[in-house]
C-alpha cells in the first residue's frame, strides 16, 4: 500500500488529528481536577464545620389547674361546694418570673362582691400568694371587684381591687377606693390607693403608700 494515495493520506491525517484532540481533552480534565482549590476549600470547610450546639429548654411547671385551686379553697372554708360561687378566673403574669399565675374569684352570696386569690409558683412550689391577714384565712385582697392591670406603668400588671368607701362608719359613700398591689419578690404589697367616683373619675389624689420601685 502506497502512502502517496490521497485517500490513505486523508484517513491517516484524520486519525492523527483525533488523537491530538483526545490527548488535549484528557490533559485539560486532569488539570481542572487538581487546580480548583476553591472547591476543595469549600468542601473541607463544610466537612469540618462544628455541629450546632443543642440546648435543652429549662423545664417549666405545667399550667396551674384552677379547678384544683377552687377545691383547695372549698376545703379550707369547710362548707359545701354550692356555698362558694366561683366566678371568672384568668392566667396572668404578676410576679415577673416568666410563668403565669392564676387569679381566681368567688362570691359567698353576700353584698360584698367577689373575694379573690392569686396562686403561683414560689421557690418551685405551687403556693397561695395572696397576702395573709393576721390571724385570718388569706383573703387580704378584701372583697369587691378585682382585676389585673398595669396602673403604675412598671411594665407588669398589678392586682387592683375596687370597693365602695365609707363616708362615716357603717355608711357607704358614692366613692370607690382602688387598692393597688404589686409583687416585691416575696409578697404582694399595697403600694397605692386611688379614689374614684362611680364613673371612674378621680375624686382625690392618689394615696402613695410605698414607692413603685418596691415592685419587682
Image (cartoon, rainbow, N blue to C red):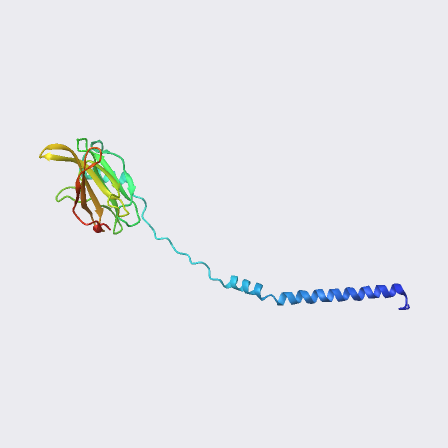
Query: Picture quarter containing residue 146?
Result: top left
Answer with left or right where residue 175 lies relative to residue 154: left
- Disc tally is 0
Furthest residue in direction left, as rendered = 169
Residue appearing at x 63%, y 65% in the figure: 33
Foreground of the two, 155 or 93: 155
Residue appearing at x 77%, y 64% in the figure: 18
Whether residue 167 is visible, yes or no, is yes
Foreground of the two, 200 or 113: 200
Whether residue 140 is visible, yes or no, is no
> Where does residue 160 sit, x and y in percent of width and height?
22, 41
> Where does residue 165 sit, x and y in percent of width and height?
14, 36
Query: Picture quarter containing residue 27?
Result: bottom right
Foreground of the two, 20 or 174: 174
Residue appearing at x 52%, y 63% in the figure: 45
Indicate the quadrant containing the N terminus: top left, top right, bottom left or bottom right. Answer: bottom right
> Where does residue 6 sit, x and y in percent of width and height?
89, 64
Answer with left or right where residue 29 lies relative to residue 17: left
193 up-or-down from 21: above or below = above
Query: Picture quarter containing residue 73?
Result: top left
104 up-or-down from 5: above or below = above
Amino acid at each position: 500500500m502506497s502512502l502517496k494515495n490521497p485517500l490513505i493520506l486523508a484517513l491517516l491525517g484524520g486519525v492523527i488529528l483525533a488523537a491530538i484532540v483526545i490527548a488535549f481533552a484528557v490533559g485539560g480534565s486532569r488539570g481542572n481536577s487538581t487546580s480548583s482549590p476553591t472547591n476543595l476549600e469549600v468542601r473541607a470547610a463544610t466537612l469540618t464545620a462544628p455541629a450546632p450546639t443543642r440546648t435543652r429548654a429549662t423545664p417549666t411547671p405545667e399550667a396551674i389547674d384552677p379547678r384544683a385551686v377552687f377545691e383547695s379553697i372549698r376545703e379550707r372554708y369547710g362548707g359545701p361546694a354550692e356555698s362558694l360561687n366561683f366566678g371568672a378566673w384568668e392566667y396572668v403574669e404578676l410576679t415577673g418570673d416568666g410563668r403565669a399565675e392564676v387569679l381566681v374569684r368567688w362570691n359567698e352570696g353576700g353584698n360584698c362582691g367577689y373575694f379573690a386569690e392569686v396562686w403561683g409558683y414560689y421557690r418551685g412550689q405551687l403556693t397561695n400568694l395572696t397576702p395573709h391577714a393576721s390571724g385570718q384565712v388569706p383573703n387580704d385582697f378584701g372583697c369587691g371587684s378585682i382585676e389585673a392591670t398595669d396602673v403604675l406603668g412598671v411594665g407588669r400588671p398589678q392586682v387592683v381591687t375596687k370597693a365602695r368607701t365609707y363616708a362615716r362608719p357603717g355608711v357607704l359613700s358614692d366613692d370607690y377606693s382602688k387598692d393597688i398591689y404589686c409583687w416585691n419578690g416575696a409578697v404582694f404589697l399595697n403600694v397605692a390607693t386611688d379614689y374614684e367616683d362611680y364613673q371612674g373619675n378621680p375624686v382625690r389624689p392618689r394615696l402613695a403608700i410605698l414607692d413603685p420601685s418596691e415592685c419587682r
